[in-house]
Each structure stands twice: as C-alpha cells, then as structure tokens.
Amino acid sequence: MSGTVLILRPEPGASATAARARAMGLAPVVAPLFEVEPLAWSPPTGRRHDAIFFTSAHAARLGGAGLEALRCLPVYAVGEATADAARAAGFAQVHAGPADGAALLALAAADGVRRALHLCGRDHMPLRHPDVEVEAQPVYAAVECGAPLDIPAGAVALLHSPRAAALFARRVRGRGGIRIAAISAATAAAAGEGWAAVAVAARPRDEAVLEVAHALCQSSGPDRAGADA
C-alpha cells in the first residue's frame, strides 16, 4: 500500500506534520483546507479574569498587540506546542495542560481559577465547567481555501478537527477509495460514513494521528480501526 499521507491542516502545523511524517518514512503531501488569519480584537475591559486559556497555538501566535495587556495573567494551554507558543508570545506563567479543552478546564478549576478568558478561533468549541465562568474572545479565523483538492491515489487523509473533516467530506467524491486518520472520534463522526477505512488516534495529538495513518498505510482492505480508542 502507498505510504502517502495527505495533510489538510493549516500552516504552520502542516509543515510540522510533514516533518514528522518524513521521519516515520511516510511521504507527505501538504494541501491545507484552511488559511489562518488574525482578527481585530481588544481585551475585555471592566472584568477581572484569573487566567487565560489557549486551546490552539494559533491564538497565541496571532493574538497580536491585544495580548500585551494580558501577559500578567497565568496561561493554561492545551499541549506543549500551544504552551511554547504562549511563552513565545511573552507569557511567563504557562501551564501545559491535558489533551483537550475540557480536561484543561478541569485542571484550572482544581487550581482555583473561577473566571477565565478563552482566546480562541472564530469557530471554536465552547468550554464549560460548573465552577468556572469562561468568556470566549476570538482572535483568529480559519478561512477555507478555494484551491482544488487533489488527492493522490492510495493516500491516507489526516483530519485534525471536526470542521476539517466536514469540509473534506463535502469536497471529495468517491469516498470508497479514500482512507482517513482522525484525531478524535468526534472528528471521525464529522467525516461521516462510506470511507474505505477510518482510524481514530488513541490520543488527540498529531503524533498519534500519524501513528494510525502509518498503520493504515501498512494494511489493505476496508476497515474501521481504533473507533473506540
């Protein structure tokens, strides 16, 4: 079977995934479905927040001048890559949290955070916890690319979000010949049915997506692997 993987996430994540794929002996093809761009925004005034939440490194990279007034606050970030982006943006108190926003919110609540500012994308999953009031502030947007989608024969498509999965499903024909590797069960569900094979990563990490993609590349025949992982 082909060792080609189709990388659909936006830059700079796409290039990072491509580098990891090459290190695993895979052949990456980068074809982002989205381009990420900053939004005009200002920090909320008149309200005190205990912490900043970053669930995507894009928010830290593209937050711009609005971040300056918030750098005194501690940051809770999903994963090390997002935590590194927060540090690069000038935040000194950065907690690299668990794999998803809900787990990150639970960690912050256990630390005593009661009011948080979630710097996020225009399209985002709301964060909710009974003990924490979360105010969402979009600072970037992922805009759909209009370029034609060329899927190499035999490639495994990597899906890093439910929104990407839904868009990919709308833009392709002939699902029966395409295998997908999804970052989560929700992402796989957003892609729908009818694919040649579906594998779900054991953890919501880029490395885990590549692991299941590598396994798909070594297998043959339709399958739905890792759906309960």
Image: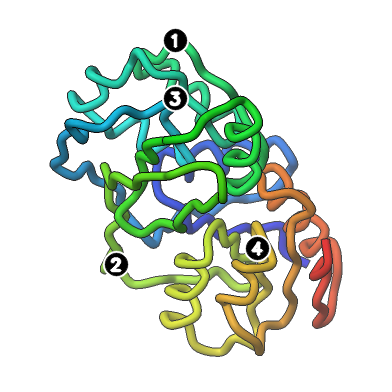
As helix, strand or loop, the secondary structure at mark 1 comes to loop
Q: Which residue appears at 65% of the width and 57% of the height? A: 183
- Which comes before the other along the chain, label 1 or label 4? 1
Residue 22, quarter of the rendered image = top right
Dot label at residue 92:
1
- Which comes before the other along the chain, label 2 or label 4? 2
Towards the viewer: 228 or 130: 130
Q: CA distance from mark 3 to mark 2?
A: 29 Å
Q: Which residue appears at 60% of the width and 48% of the height? A: 102
As helix, strand or loop, the secondary structure at mark 4 comes to strand
Q: CA distance from mark 4 to mark 3?
A: 24 Å
Towards the viewer: 57 or 127: 127
Q: Nearer the viewer, mark 4 or mark 3?
A: 3
Q: CA distance from mark 1 to mark 2?
A: 39 Å
Q: From the viewer's perspective, is residue 64 above or below residue 91?
A: below
For disc 3, the marked residue is 85
Q: Is residue 209 left or right of residue 52?
A: right
For disc 4, the marked residue is 182
The amino acid beneath tag 1 is Ala
Dot label at residue 147:
2
Q: Residues within 10 Å of mark 4 (few under 14, many from 20)?
A: many
Q: Is residue 71 left or right of residue 40?
A: right
Q: Residues within 10 Å of mark 1 (few under 14, many from 20)?
A: some
- Which comes before the other along the chain, label 3 or label 1? 3
- Which comes before the other along the chain, label 3 or label 2? 3
Q: CA distance from mark 3 to mark 1?
A: 11 Å
As helix, strand or loop, the secondary structure at mark 3 comes to helix
The amino acid beneath tag 2 is Ala
Towards the viewer: 66 or 74: 74
Q: CA distance from mark 1 to mark 4?
A: 33 Å
Residue 207, quarter of the rendered image = top right
Q: Nearer the viewer, mark 1 or mark 4?
A: 1
